[in-house]
Amino acid sequence: MLKQIRYFQSVVRLGSFTAAAEAHFISQSAISQQIKALEDELGVMLLVRRKRSFTLTPAGELFYKKSLVLVADYDDLVRAVQRVAGNADERLRVGLLKAYSGKEFNAAVSAFTVQHPDVTVEVTHGNHDALYALLRDGALDVVLNDQRRAFSDEYVNIVLDIREYYAEISANSPIAQLDEVEITDLKNTPLILLATPDQQETERRFYTQDLGFPSEIRFIDHIDDALMQVIQGKGFMLIEGSGDTVQTTTKALRLLRNGKPIIRRYCAFLRADASKAHAEAFVEILRAQF
């Protein structure tokens, strides 16, 4: 019954049998049958089904609210019992690119947790080279990273998304009147990057030699401090996309190099000789978010 209750909760939370079926990687007819079996077990109707929608019955509303507490308590009990028995939770060690700002990763962790409640996701943030080294040395199981070198057969390489670079600059800058700008036109505006001292030289080489930025580079430890520099017109930051909300203090300009947009490929990487079932499952869920 516990699995049926989880299916029911997903249907209500997502508002759709189809979405719930996709979240649990089963067919829509299968999840519908499971909900019907739950209703038969309880002896009450939880949902009033229509062609493409449903509504909760009063009994369904009560069962949904109480079942959330019930399942949460059950999950806590399972973890407590495993700890007492000396069985630590399984871990999935995931590396996340420090500069990545999309919402897809958090959505993937959330969906993975629903599918694998007994697996703890441990996230490590770092720049490209730091994450690459941790994956290579076996300290991480899967990495969401940008692509800076040719793909290697030693890894499972999955392209998740291709995004254009934008320059976030002060809204008070005259350049903010533009919608796109060549990187050479920003040569007198410092490029602000987030990096720890041990990462700075690697990041400097990549942005100057590989991407061709002619600007002075300034390294900042924290995103809030970097944003303050941008707002005051002391430099620009790199972002992907023009942003989801309207900004009044900064402006995002599409970055061009010789008239063409500068792009960044986001990829998921696993070691080919040490791939794990949970890592592969997480990557599949991550791919679905893009």
Image (tube, rainbow, N blue to C red):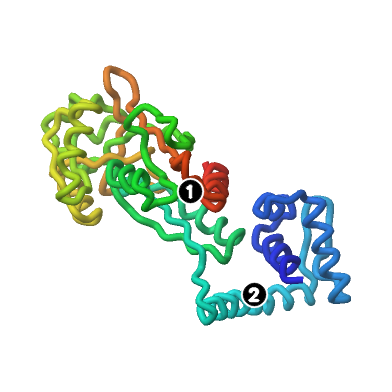
Comparing 225 with 148, the one in front is 148
Comparing 226 with 110, the one in front is 110
Judge whether residue 168 can be spotted in this image: yes
Is residue 127 left or right of 228 when viewed as pictured? right
Above or below residue 290? Residue 3 is: below
Q: Nearer the viewer, mark 2 or mark 1?
A: 2
Tag 2 secondary structure: helix
Query: Where's the N terminus, which quadrant?
Result: bottom right
Q: Position of residue 189 (x, y in %)?
A: 14, 35
Residue 71 - label: 2
Q: Position of residue 136 (x, y in %)?
A: 35, 43
From mark 2 to mark 1, how far is it between C-alphas?
Answer: 26 Å
What amino acid type is highlighted by mark number 1? Glu
Above or below residue 211? Residue 3 is: below
What amino acid type is highlighted by mark number 2? Val
Which of the 4 quarters of the picture holds residue 271?
A: top left
Tag 1 secondary structure: helix
Judge whether residue 247 can be spotted in this image: no
Comparing 284 with 54, the one in front is 284
Residue drawn at 37 percent across, 32 percent down: 164
Q: Which residue is mark 1?
A: 104
Instruction: Look at the numbered discs 2 and 1 and tell me whether their residues touch, using CB distance below 8 Å.
Output: no
Residue drawn at 86 percent across, 75 percent down: 44
Is residue 190 left or right of 280 when viewed as pictured? left
Residue drawn at 16 percent across, 48 percent down: 198
Which of the 4 quarters of the picture holds residue 253?
A: top left
Residue 238 - label: none
Is residue 240 left or right of 25 when viewed as pictured? left
Q: Position of residue 62 (x, y in %)?
A: 73, 78
